[in-house]
Image (spheres, helix red, strand yellow):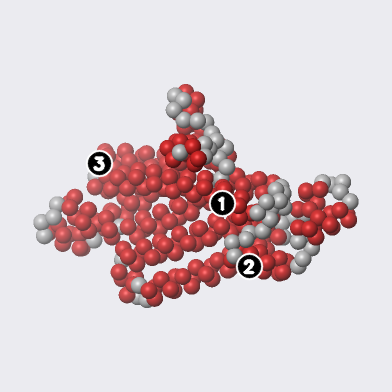
Amino acid sequence: MLRYALKRGLSLVISLAVASLVIFFVIEIAPGDPASFMLGINAEPDTVAALRAELGLDQGKLQRYLAWVGGMLQGDFGMSYTYRTPVAGMIADRMWVSLPLALYALTLSTLIAFPAGIYAAARRGKAGDMAVMGATQLGVAVPNFWFAMILVLVFAINLRWFGAGGFAGWDDGLGTALHSLTLPAIALALPQAAILARVMRSALLDILGEDFMRTARAKGLTRRQALWRHGLRNAMIPVLTIIGLQFSFLLAGAIIIEQVFFLPGLGRLVFQAISSRDLIVVESVVMILVFAVITVNFLVDLAYALVDPRLRSRT
């Protein structure tokens, strides 16, 4: 297990190094100059040159890349061009919205998908299975921002159980903060739950047709007992893959939902930074999100080894 973890850890480090190169140089070659954007089209050339020197934009790309990576390794992401505040502080403030939102949505997605997928697999071809698959097909087809608008219309405007947007803040209490994240989390969770339920059903149906499941039934186990004792664990590998991918999507891809609900998360921060050509913020936030995605995939690989011991024996 240790050797397996070390190999995956080395792969993680290499992936992060390659990702940092790609992120930095792709953003750097994007058209537009941050200093010119900040000063406007009528700025004098010497004024633009002075601001570029102040922001460190007059240095070579390689020198700036090494300074950026070296700073990140020490927890220093640089200074925002627009707000003139440390980028690390801006990311930390926004992370306290985006990360709980992603975890909340993933929890809801899992709580919905697991029972639905297991129920559908246990009743294959019956009315219950068709109802679950019909609902999941609708969930896959409808975009999450449409769910978000419907939730606002029903639960915020008509019933007034929730606010239409904004974030109360953690200082007002855990319950109040989670209450303000509930509608966004549901909007994010429903499409992901539909995908996860379909994967769970398909994985279980594949496992139910295996020889070891027939052997378990021949030894006297009921279909339900065989499903819970032997089928569920063996079906978890593809399900874990989807859960890992979903967390990455929920953390990095919630920009539209954050815009709909006016949440001060990482998605809105990236959107604002792109609009103002604040390159250091864009680079740092994207790198943080890539780090989260790669780290989650690393943890999923470790979970594979725990669920399926055969993976450990191959390393």
Q: Mark 2 points at which residue?
A: 70
Q: Which residue is drawn at 81% across and 55% down?
A: 51
Three-letter amino acid code at the position of disc 1: Ala
Residue assigned mark 1: 92
Name which residue lies at 54% across and 50% down.
95
Which is nearer the eye, 246 or 59?
59
Sequence-first tag of 2 and 1: 2
Residue 94, horizontal then vertical, whole percent: 56, 47
Q: Which of marks 2 and 3 is nearer the N terminus?
A: 2
Q: From mark 2 to mark 3, how far is it between C-alphas? A: 59 Å
Q: Where is residue 238 in the image (x, y as percent from the top left)?
A: 36, 58
Residue bearing mark 3: 126
Q: Which comes sooner in the sequence, label 3 or label 1?
A: 1
Q: Residue at x 20, y 63 (%)?
A: 212
Q: Distance between the residues labelled 2 and 1?
A: 19 Å
Question: Which residue is situated farthest in the left direction here?
Answer: 220
